[in-house]
């Protein structure tokens, strides 16, 4: 069975083509704002303008024709409505034209499932850190539950906003990581509340310190504080649930300091640490296809309203029939 997955929750439009044994293609095209943050209308126009060419490239890469597709999956939640709608319309059209079933997929769960499929962990605690999302997810009692999350913004957006204040264009993460290598320690707030984390206070503090401190020192200290917060709650989640695998994913998983801190924590408690290949950590269509296939195989049934976009669906609202 060949499943075609469509991702369009945020700044990336992606199409992945997968079978039960192989990931045949994973093509994506991302919108980057000329200045400032993501502009929803511009991002959705970007997606609409690239969807045909991304599809063509994906089919070519997979060496299949469109008619060979047996199943279409799309990320219907959570995300920004403008962009979600482009993916939804594209997916519905393909499924109608090809006369194949359509599977609505939760984007956050797809990040976990492509991790499980490509790196071989079985029952991980997942630290999912991207632009809009910061969640610690683990499977328990038929659901992917959120054991910890951000109380305000996603860690990637936090890093990008700090970068913007410092005059670094989007995406700021990779530049900040480089600058951090030349920095020294400066005290910043440390904001863990129970199992949750919060970033807006640290952001204001950093913004104020931009006038008085070296940027390199702020980048270094930001990473040390914020990643320590994420690792602290990840460790607590591992301990509470007595799980022994940590899966790090999302765009911020590219950061080598965050990886190193996760690795050290896992080593200390005898847990295994996993990070998927970068193309499967960032937003991508293959993960949507992987989860679409799992849901289809599990016999999941959908009502008309399930095919609608759902900007705010939470990870634990989806019944997990495939585990
Ligand atoms: P989502 O829709 O899941 O929130 P997204 O649209 O933000 O995802 P991703 O590609 O998963 O897309 O993540 C992008 C984020 O990752 C950006 O905020 C970017 O700054 C951050 N990022 C990328 N590389 C690094 C890095 N080396 N260090 C820190 N952050 C990074
Ligand atoms: Fe994502």
Image (spheres, rainbow, N blue to C red):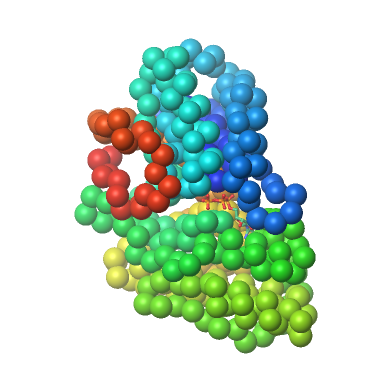
- Seen at 25% across and 40% down, the residue is 321
Residue 256 x, y percent position in the rendering: 63, 63
- Seen at 65% across and 78% down, the residue is 206
Q: Is residue 32 visible?
A: yes
Residue 221 against residue 2 in the figure, above or below: below
Q: Quadrant of residue 14?
A: top right
Q: Is residue 295 left or right of residue 264?
A: left
Q: Quadrant of residue 31?
A: top right
- Seen at 61% across and 77% down, the residue is 204
Residue 294 x, y percent position in the rendering: 34, 35
- Seen at 53% across and 72% down, the residue is 199
Residue 197 x, y percent position in the rendering: 46, 72
Q: Is residue 200 left or right of residue 32?
A: left
Q: Is residue 119 visible?
A: no
Q: Is residue 191 left or right of residue 196?
A: right
Q: Quadrant of residue 97?
A: top left
Which is nearer the eye, 233 or 95?
Answer: 95
Residue 204 against residue 110 in the figure, above or below: below
Quadrant for the C terminus, please.
top left
Residue 75 x, y percent position in the rendering: 45, 39
């Amino acid at each position: 069975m060949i499943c075609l997955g469509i991702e369009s929750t945020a700044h990336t439009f992606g199409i992945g083509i997968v079978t039960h044994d192989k990931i045949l293609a994973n093509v994506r095209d991302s919108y980057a704002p000329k200045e400032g943050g993501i502009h929803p209308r511009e991002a959705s126009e970007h997606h609409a303008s690239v969807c045909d060419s991304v599809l063509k490239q994906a089919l070519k890469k997979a060496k299949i024709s469109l008619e060979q597709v047996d199943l279409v999956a799309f990320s219907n939640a959570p995300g920004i409505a403008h962009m979600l709608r482009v993916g939804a319309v594209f997916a519905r059209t393909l499924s109608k034209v090809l006369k194949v079933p359509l599977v609505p997929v939760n984007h956050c769960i797809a990040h976990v499932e492509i991790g499980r499929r490509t790196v071989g962990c079985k029952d991980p605690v997942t630290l999912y850190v991207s632009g809009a999302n910061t969640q610690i997810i683990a499977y328990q009692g038929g659901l992917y539950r959120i054991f910890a999350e951000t109380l305000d913004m996603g860690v990637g957006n936090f890093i990008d906003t700090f970068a913007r204040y410092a005059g670094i264009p989007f995406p700021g993460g990779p530049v900040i990581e480089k600058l951090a290598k030349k920095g020294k320690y400066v005290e910043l707030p440390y904001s863990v509340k129970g199992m949750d984390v919060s970033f807006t206070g640290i952001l204001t503090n950093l913004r104020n310190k931009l006038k008085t401190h070296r940027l390199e020192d702020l980048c270094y200290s930001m990473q040390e504080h914020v990643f320590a917060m994420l690792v602290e709650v990840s460790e607590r989640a591992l301990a509470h649930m007595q799980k022994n695998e940590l899966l790090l994913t999302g765009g911020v998983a590219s950061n080598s300091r965050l990886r190193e801190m996760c690795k050290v924590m896992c080593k200390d408690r005898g847990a295994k640490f996993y990070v998927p290949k970068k193309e499967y950590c960032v937003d991508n269509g293959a993960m949507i296809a992987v989860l679409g296939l799992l849901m289809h195989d599990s016999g999941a049934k959908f009502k008309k309203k399930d095919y609608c976009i759902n900007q705010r669906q939470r990870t634990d609202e989806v019944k997990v029939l495939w585990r």
